[in-house]
Amino acid sequence: MPDEPTRARTTRLHPHCVAVYGTLKRGGSNHRFLRGARFLGRTRLNTIALYDLGAYPGAKLEPSRGVEVELFAVTDAGLRRVDWLEEYNPQDPASGTYDRRWLATPLGPAWVYLYNPGVKGRRRIVQGGWR
């Protein structure tokens, strides 16, 4: 499958599109949480900025020069696994470590996990990717 398809496509079996930017990317320490997901491609988002949190990055909804993301089509169970990893609370999204937001990407809309806590004193990654 090419790295840069023209549009991300979900299916009935993989109905959710998730854009990942840190440990969930291919080769990352948490990529196993995307087992069974279909890789859809790579792109950049200039609507988020990354912050280096040490063991993982956190994204904030801020302009940037382009954050590298990978898109995956996931099942309902796959989305629940990532929600669990990211400590996303669907009943109260602001209370979890991450909020899940539907954002436009050049390959089509996708869920993106945004870091809820403050990032004061953390290094901002203005372009590219995390590690």
Image (tube, grey):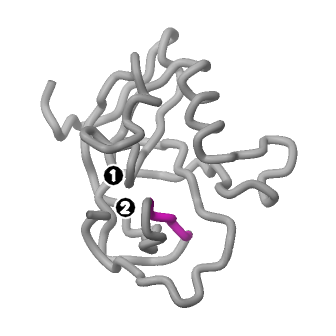
Q: Earlier in the sequence, mark 2 or mark 1?
A: 2
The residue that disc 1 covers is: 69
Q: Residue furthest top?
A: 13
Q: Which of 89 and 8 is in front in this view?
A: 89
The amino acid type of the residue labelled 1 equals: Val
Checking the image for residue 45, the label placed there is: 2
Residue placed at 78% from the left, 41% from the top?
90
Q: Quadrant of residue 32?
A: top left
Q: Do the residues labelled 2 and 1 touch (CB within 8 Å)?
A: yes
Position in image of residue 118 (x %, y %): 65, 78
- The N terminus is located in which quarter? top left
- Classify residue 28 by image quadrant: top left
Cα distance, mark 2 to mark 1?
Answer: 7 Å
Q: Can residue 49 be seen in this view?
A: no
Q: Where is residue 53 in the image (x, y as percent from the top left)?
A: 48, 70
Q: Is residue 59 highlighted in magenta?
A: yes
Can you tell which quarter of the image residue 114 is in?
Answer: bottom right
Whether residue 80 is in magenta: the answer is no
- In the image, 55 versus 130, the foreground residue is 55
Q: Judge whether 128 appears above or below 14 on screen.
A: below
Tell me which segment is drawn in magenta.
Answer: 56-60
